[in-house]
Image: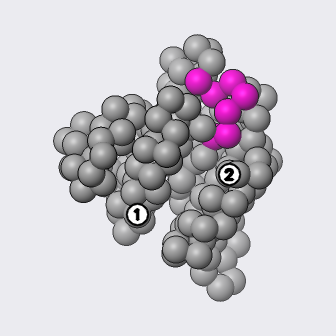
Amino acid sequence: MVLLVDVSGSMSPYADALLRVAHAAARARPASTEVFTIGTRLTRVTREMRLRDPDKALAASGHAIPDWSGGTRIGEVLKAFLDRWGQRGTARGAVVVVCSDGWERGGTELLGEQMARLHRLAHSVVWVNPHKGRAGYEPLTGGMQAALPAVDHFVAGHSLAAFEELAGVIENA
């Protein structure tokens, strides 16, 4: 499993909880789980997420993440992930979980291309959007519109119930 957690400014209210979910996944299956943060750059935080204590894991991750609460360039960051890690097999046959609201400051065409590339490599692509849990939500942002054709499971990420649903989706993917 690969988790890509958006830590941009628009995801600030959700990033801590999503990183705690990533920590639980990394602790449950340390040999087969990779965790990265996405924003204006890609940061691998797998080692930090494997620390036993969740508060220490999040603090260590926070020190490692240079672009916390910055912008989001999902397409560029996803390309960097696929170029460096995807070709090495990290994404090949994996369940890849992207946790983001889909606000894209870069080009949505690049995001669509990289999502299609990810979809070809991965076993399953899950997109977790905290806004999906709101009544009346529709994925109208350019980033979500570009990403959704390559997403196998589109789930909410705003509550404990949503995280339980996410766990079920991952388990059955």
Residue nearer the viewer, 171 or 148: 171
Which residue shows up at 65% across the image and 85% down it?
A: 135
Location of residue 88 in the rendering, given as x and y in whole percent from the top left corner: 58, 14
Location of residue 79 in the rendering, given as x and y in whole percent from the top left corner: 56, 27
Residue nearer the viewer, 72 or 18: 18
Please determine whether, in this image, residue 19 is positioned above or below residue 156.
above
Looking at the rendered structure, which numbered label has been put on residue 59? none
Q: How many marks?
A: 2
Q: Is residue 50 visible?
A: yes
Tag 1: Cα neighbours inside 10 Å, few (<14), some, or many (≥20)? some
Q: Amino acid at mark 2?
A: Ile
Q: Is residue 14 left or right of residue 89?
A: left
Q: Is residue 41 visible?
A: no
Location of residue 2 in the rendering, given as x and y in whole percent from the top left corner: 56, 37
Q: Which segment is the magenta one?
A: 90-96
**Label 1 sits on residue:** 17
In what element is the residue under mark 1? Answer: helix
Q: Is residue 35 left or right of residue 116?
A: left
Position of the N terminus, as image quadrant, is: top right
Residue nearer the viewer, 126 or 24: 24
**Label 2 sits on residue:** 170
Contact (CB < 8 A) between labels 1 and 2? no
What colouring method underlies this structural image? one colour
Res 49 → quadrant: top left
Which residue shows up at 34% across the image and 32% down it?
A: 47
The Cα atoms of the two marked residues, 1 and 2, are separated by: 17 Å
